[in-house]
Amino acid sequence: MDAAWIHDDGEEGQGGEASRVWPWWSFSKTIIAGCALRLSQEGALDLEAPYGGPHTLRQLLQHRAGVPCYGGLRAYHDAVARGDTPWSRERLVREAGSELLFAPGEGWAYSNIGYMLAREAVEAAAGCDIGSLAARYYAEPLALATMRLAEVPGDFAESPGAAGYHPGWVYHRCFMGSARDAARLVGVLALELGGQPVHRLGGGIEGRPWSETGYGLGVMAGAVEGAGRVVGHSGSGPFSHCAIYHFADVARPVSVATFGTGASEAGPEWEAVRIALGG
């Protein structure tokens, strides 16, 4: 497993090949939310305004809009397994359906399509693509040399097990980079997004380190066994998984990014907790 960590006092550490480039999967949602918040602070975007339907942009970013997702579609998984070209946006919406799962604000359901809509709103407000905007706000100021959008299958060539997977299947877009750059970035994003309201989801998740779960503005926010509060995001794809979090309650607050090829996010999450506790 590849890992990197950066304590709030500046001391860094790493394990495995911390400079190897991996997909950041759903940590990309955290980056989209960070860009949205920056734009709103600049007056270019209103998080409380309706977008793409009766839901607000904030509800899309919190998975509280009721928008369906394609993650459970058999046709989607079959197409990915065959190595098909990613569907058009139109086919994606047709396959997933357009009926809301619940009235906006009245429930919670994880939705990559919701984040596709959110990303489109951010790009329209910024007048540029999400990759360029994230570079302006984060990659360039923080000197994150490996951070970029994945565009073609070859972008994942360094990642074990990628086998030609097309990043176009990630409809909200997929950022990628090293564990070190992810750890550096999550420290900044946790500070920016950590103060936003969190929708509480409940207690633990079997087999994973969570003792409390919640979702904020583009972040998984809750508590984990032994390490207290965390803010960040786990990520999962067909060939790799990651956990990218800031741990504020440990003796030496630390930002940690872990990447591996196990069966789920559980492995990287447990490894991140072990690192945060000084293991």
Image (spheres, grey):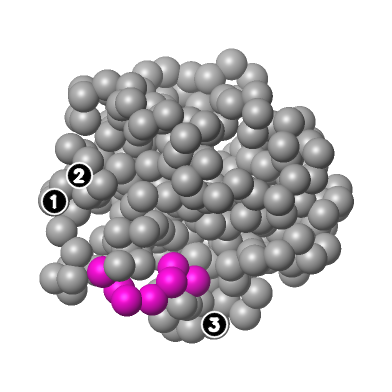
Above or below 70: residue 194: below
Nearer the observer: mark 1 or 3; the answer is 1
Determine if residue 244 is in view.
no
Q: Earlier in the sequence, mark 2 or mark 1?
A: 1
Q: Are marks 2 and 1 in contact (CB under 8 Å)?
A: yes
Q: Residue 12's spot in the image, x, y percent?
A: 62, 67
Q: Earlier in the sequence, mark 2 or mark 3?
A: 2
Q: Is residue 40 left or right of residue 248?
A: left
In the image, residue 257 lies in the stretch drawn in magenta? no
Rounded to the nearest angstrom, the CA distance separating label 2 from label 1 is 5 Å
Quarter in which the C terminus is drawn: top right
Local secondary structure at mark 1: loop
Q: Residue 174's spot in the image, x, y percent?
A: 57, 57
Q: Residue 29's spot in the image, x, y percent?
A: 45, 51
Above or below 60: residue 105: above
Q: Is residue 206 left or right of residue 55?
A: right
Local secondary structure at mark 2: loop
Dot 3 surroundings within 10 Å: few (below 14), some, or many (20 or more)? few
Q: Residue at x 60, y 46 (%)?
A: 87
Amino acid under disc 2: Thr
Q: Which mark is residue 143?
A: 3
The quadrant where residue 155 appears: bottom right
Determine if residue 57 is in view.
yes
Q: Which mark is residue 56?
A: 2
Q: Earlier in the sequence, mark 1 or mark 3?
A: 1
- The boundaries of the magenta stretch are 125-131
The quadrant where residue 197 appears: top left
Local secondary structure at mark 3: loop
